[in-house]
Image (cartoon, grey):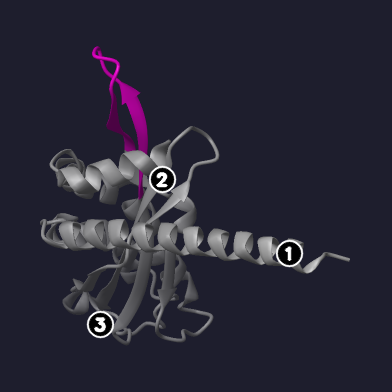
Amino acid sequence: MLKPSGLFILLCGLLALASAQEALSRVSSQITNALTQGLLGTDILSALQTIDFQGSLQSVFSVAGGNQNILGGLLTNRDANLMVQVKDLRLLQVYLENSPNFKGVDLRIPLAFSIQINFPALNPSIFYVQTDMRVQLYLEKGADSKHRLAFGHCRIAPDTVWIQSENLVTPVKKIIVENVERVLGDLIIHNLGAKICPFINSFLHNLNPQVTNELISKCW
């Protein structure tokens, strides 16, 4: 059993640890808030509009249009018009996490948007999309032996790609939805990073010095 003095010391130690963790959490929150607001000031979201979702999805509906069994014979050549709109573009709160593969941290940049598809003979469909961009942050020693913040590969994290259709579909039309989700997934993994990463890289290379120093402290 601890003596009163020993218990007091233990409680003081726990309070000090809790205070340190709270301070660290507060600093991390300040960093991620600054990064989120800074990225919102770039054209990162407008880059999504330059991806040719319609051209890529056209092949899915061209196949469906040629297969009257899939659409129940409701489609004619006159109806074969596809309209795709990107809506509700959002940059969510960024966050930092320790990387298991290297000494440094991963900057995670979550994005969310929806794809509205209008196609004759089918009800308008909305596909909700979420995914994370990932950038490796680490320290690099310069010729003067001082450490500087360096940035690794910027890319989509494939395991974070999430696509969900709003509408319930019949088993007959399910194949179209599955093909749309497959095409969207491929586009996001292979094209989204190429469009958005240049904006992220430019932003990181021009960070406020205070934010840079705080990120450096996180990478030790």
Assess disc 2: are there few (<14), some (14-19) or many (≥20) residues with their C-alpha within 10 Å of its C-alpha.
Answer: many
Of marks 2 and 1, the one in the foreground: 1
Percent of width and height locating residue 129: 36, 68
| Circle nearer the viewer, 2 or 3 | 2
Residue at (75% x, 61% y) in the render: 6
Please state, as top left, top right, bottom left or bottom right, where the C terminus lies in the image.
top left
The residue sitting at 20% across, 41% down in the picture is 201
SS assignment at label 3: loop
Q: Is residue 105 left or right of residue 201?
A: right
Place of residue 195 in the rendered image (x, y in percent of width and height, measured from the top left) = 20, 48
Query: Which image quarter: residue 148?
Result: top left
Question: Badges 1 and 3: C-beta atoms under 8 Å apart?
Answer: no
Circle 1 Cα neighbour tier, 10 Å, few/some/many (<14 / 14–19 / ≥20): few
Q: Is residue 73 above or below residue 143?
A: below
Foreground residue among 217 and 191 = 217
The image quarter in which residue 70 lies = bottom left
| The residue stretch that appears in magenta | 134-153
Q: Residue furthest top?
A: 143
Q: Secondary structure at mark 1?
A: helix
Q: Which numbered tag is attached to residue 120?
A: 3
Q: In the image, 187: left or right of 2? A: left
Amino acid at circle 2: Asp
Q: What amino acid is found at the position of numbered circle 1 in the picture? A: Ser
Residue identifier under label 2: 106
Q: How far separated are the C-alphas under marks 1 and 3?
A: 79 Å
Mark 3: which amino acid?
Pro
In the image, residue 110 sits, relative to residue 78, either above or below, namely above
Residue at left offset 29%, top offset 73%: 114
Marks 2 and 1, the one that precedes in the sequence: 1
Q: Which is nearer the N-term, disc 2 or disc 3?
A: 2
Mark seen at residue 5? 1
Q: Is residue 97 above or below residue 161?
A: above
